[in-house]
Image (cartoon, coloured by chain):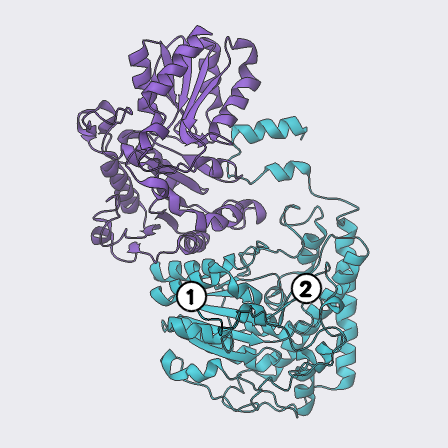
């Protein structure tokens, strides 16, 4: 080693803008709506490698649905989708306030990401199983899970289906195809592959979906899921929700030197593509394509939903401390509710008045459900679960040591 | 009844369970075509097909994570971690997921899953093929932990574990795979083929979880042991002439405390033996439980005989291993005190 060798230095990526900076997304390449075509569902993953570097988009700036991926949903379905997203946003707003009022300990909202889970849910069939993260409650809202049950869980009240054991929003509903959320990051990704393998082992026709955030793709579970999905050609749709931020850490820390998260699928021979996560029609169309692909036995698909977390990570962080306050407004893919609304107006099936009316109706409904839930109880008042409940269900049959401990505790 | 090794007994338990229930699936590293590095799954792929017994990528957390998904679907995965020493990458899936799924979802999802792994030393496996990690599982609520010490129990306990509705960690003392081992490593190896506990019932006869077995009855001191240490303790009793009652715990979680307490109250003395490291080992838990339940019956302080708090060594294996000499010394000491 000669003295002419310069000392090494560590590369620590930085986001484009921090608090006080002016957001600049000019480097973010966005193809025109309709530009990326729809391949056949039995496509060889190798022949669509370019899709991992582009973005499937349907809604253009004028609010028109264009290209191969358009046309999958009826007007009624689109209006229903809009209502689901509006419901989720209103629900979130009310629960966010409820947390600030001390009625629960914690909350996580979906602001700006409503299309991802709401649209995806409509591409699945009864019996399919989602392995979600904590930011896919649209899967429940859009499949008819009662908001009252969600709120009872958030409030950990006496009617909480999880008996007060789990953190708020870590729902579970086998009946609605929603696997129990652990709150751990990434673990569910490979479990979804195992579920899909079980469907194949059993000669079933059901599929599963796995969900993970941009930050958690760095976890070993992501790699494990990709290897298993690839090896066993599991009937699974693996979703990365790239909302740009993992708490305060920008997506570049997990992404490293690779071009896109979707491109990680190439090394595994998995069909990989990106979709405009703020475009309800695009998310739905891509989800339907991938679900069909899985169900027909053509194997797994990796979808990167490109979106933006317009709110904080949870009620426990203030995004103003780590990113520009203007960044959400500058996000070039817009707002999912606004975009679907504009599309419906454009095709003459919606209006500002109807929208305002729907907003008011939804707010009324959510408030009345909230009153019903609060009449049962919240974390800090009313009727809660029994302390005895914490000893139940550790095992199917309570072993002697837990019986002794429960007696010792006086329950 | 048939005379068999522990490996054959484990293989037969798989066979019986797979024949009885299509939902039982078996996978892990090298378990498919080859039948496992210890041959515990030999012949299963050929008999039941590749979708019910197959090779997995070398990713323990993936193996356990996929199995959790399968269990949630409704299958009964019986998976092999090639050595207990390799389980650590899967610890998150076991602790945060498998163990808690029933509780956190209030029974909406459950995890009937058996995670088998060879445990313990005595085979010159060095630090990566010799560890006894049972205490890191007994510490976790929601798991059951089983360690058989002979072919008869291995089959019956494995069948019980497969039937169990909750996740079971099934630790197989690899030094006992082919024969009982009393810790005298310089003596010829004995085979299960001539041993009473190598005589294994046919069919689906289970040995219930949570029940200890009194391996040797005695009046003067209770020895609590499991896995490889059962025969070491038995040998120590014979060699010292101390009338020890050797209890094979068989299941650490749930623990058969009643059998332990009854014995200690009878003998008034207690020696606890395990191969795992001492600090925060399961012996500490046993000592606490005996103290809580039997303090006024104890005539002498309890003694633990364990592996040392060092990584499992290679060349110094027999200085590390708590053999019959060290166990015998403890027996003499509690009798003298």
Q: Which residue is mark 1?
A: A226
Q: Looking at the image, which is closer to me, B244 or B102?
A: B244
Q: Give the Cα separation between the discs numbered 2 and 1.
A: 26 Å
Residue B124 in picture, x, y percent from top left:
28, 37
Residue B247 in picture, x, y percent from top left:
39, 20
Does the rendering let one see residue B1? no
Disc sitting over residue A68 in the figure = none
Q: Looking at the image, which is closer to me, B228 or A183?
A: B228
Does the rendering let one see residue A411? yes
Q: Secondary structure at mark 1?
A: helix
Q: Colour of chain B?
A: purple
Mark 2 vs 1: CB contact within 8 A:
no
Q: Which residue is mark 2?
A: A313
User: Counting other residues with Cα less than 10 Å from the Cα at mark 1, is it few (<14), some (14-19), or many (20 or more)?
Assistant: many
The answer for which chain carries disc 1 is A
Q: Which image quadrant: the N terminus of chain A?
A: bottom left
Q: Residue furthest right?
A: A101
Q: Which image quadrant: the C terminus of chain A?
A: top right
Q: Are marks 2 and 1 on the same chain?
A: yes
């Amino acid at each position: 080693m000669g003295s002419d060798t310069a000392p090494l230095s560590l590369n620590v990526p930085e986001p484009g803008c921090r608090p006080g900076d002016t957001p600049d997304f000019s480097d973010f390449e966005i193809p025109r709506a309709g530009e990326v075509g729809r391949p056949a569902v039995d496509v060889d993953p190798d022949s669509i490698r370019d899709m991992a570097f582009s973005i499937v988009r349907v809604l253009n700036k004028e609010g028109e649905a264009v290209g191969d991926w358009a046309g999958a949903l009826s007007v009624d379905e689109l209006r229903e989708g809009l209502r689901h997203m509006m419901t989720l946003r209103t629900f979130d707003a009310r629960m966010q306030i409820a947390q600030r009022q001390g009625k629960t300990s914690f909350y996580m909202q979906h602001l700006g990401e409503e299309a991802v889970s709401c649209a995806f849910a409509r591409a699945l069939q009864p019996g399919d199983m989602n392995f979600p993260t904590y930011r896919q409650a649209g899967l429940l809202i859009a499949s008819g899970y009662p908001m009252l049950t969600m709120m009872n869980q958030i409030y950990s009240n006496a009617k909480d289906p999880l008996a007060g054991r789990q953190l708020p929003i870590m729902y579970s509903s086998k009946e609605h195809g929603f696997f129990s959320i652990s709150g751990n990051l990434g673990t569910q990704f490979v479990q979804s592959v195992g579920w899909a393998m079980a469907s194949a082992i059993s000669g079933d026709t059901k599929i599963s979906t796995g969900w993970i955030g941009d930050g958690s793709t760095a976890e070993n579970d992501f790699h494990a899921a990709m290897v298993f999905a690839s090896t066993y050609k599991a009937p699974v749709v693996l979703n990365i929700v790239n909302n740009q931020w993992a708490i305060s850490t920008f997506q570049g820390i997990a992404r490293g030197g690779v071009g896109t998260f979707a491109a990680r699928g190439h090394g595994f021979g998995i069909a990989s593509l990106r979709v405009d996560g703020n475009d309800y029609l695009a998310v739905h169309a891509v989800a339907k394509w991938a679900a069909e692909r899985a169900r027909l036995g053509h194997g797994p698909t990796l979808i990167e939903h490109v979106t933006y977390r317009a709110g904080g990570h949870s009620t426990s962080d203030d995004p103003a401390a780590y990113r520009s306050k203007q960044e959400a407004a500058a996000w070039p893919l817009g707002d999912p509710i606004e975009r679907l609304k504009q599309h419906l107006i454009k095709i003459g099936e919606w209006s500002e008045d109807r929208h305002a009316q729907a907003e008011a109706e939804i707010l009324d409904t959510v408030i009345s459900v909230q009153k019903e839930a609060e009449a049962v109880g919240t974390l800090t008042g009313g009727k809660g679960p029994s302390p005895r409940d914490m000893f139940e269900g550790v095992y199917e049959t309570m072993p002697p040591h837990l019986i002794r401990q429960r007696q010792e505790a006086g329950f | 009844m048939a005379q068999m090794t522990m490996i054959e007994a484990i293989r037969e338990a798989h066979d019986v369970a797979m024949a009885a229930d299509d939902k039982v699936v078996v996978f892990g590293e090298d378990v498919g075509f080859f039948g496992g590095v210890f041959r515990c799954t030999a012949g299963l792929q050929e008999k039941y097909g590749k979708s019910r017994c197959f090779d997995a990528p070398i990713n323990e957390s993936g193996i356990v994570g996929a199995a959790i998904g399968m269990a949630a679907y409704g299958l009964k995965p019986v998976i092999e971690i090639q050595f207990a020493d390799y389980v650590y990458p899967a610890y998150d899936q076991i602790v945060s997921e498998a163990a808690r799924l029933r509780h956190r979802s209030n029974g909406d999802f459950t995890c009937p899953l058996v995670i088998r792994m060879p445990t313990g030393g005595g085979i010159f496996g060095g630090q990566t093929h010799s560890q006894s990690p049972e205490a890191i599982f007994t510490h976790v609520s929601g798991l059951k932990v089983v360690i058989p010490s002979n072919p008869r129990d291995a089959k019956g306990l494995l069948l019980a574990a497969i039937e169990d509705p909750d996740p079971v960690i099934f630790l197989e003392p690899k030094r006992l795979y082919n024969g009982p081992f009393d810790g005298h490593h310089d003596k010829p190896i004995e085979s299960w083929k001539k041993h009473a506990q190598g005589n294994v019932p046919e069919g689906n006869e289970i040995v219930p979880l949570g029940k200890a077995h009194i391996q040797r009855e005695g009046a003067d001191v209770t020895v609590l042991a499991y896995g490889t240490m059962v025969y070491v303790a038995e040998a120590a009793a014979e060699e010292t002439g101390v009338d020890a009652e050797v209890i094979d715990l068989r299941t650490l979680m749930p623990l058969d405390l009643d059998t332990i307490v009854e014995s200690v109250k009878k003998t008034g003395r207690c020696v606890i033996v395990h191969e795992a490291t001492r600090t925060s080992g399961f012996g500490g838990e046993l000592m606490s439980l005996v103290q809580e339940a039997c303090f006024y019956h104890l005539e002498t302080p309890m003694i633990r005989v364990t592996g040392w708090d060092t990584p499992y060594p290679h060349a110094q294996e027999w200085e590390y291993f708590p053999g019959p000499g060290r166990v015998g010394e403890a027996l003499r000491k509690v009798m003298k005190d």
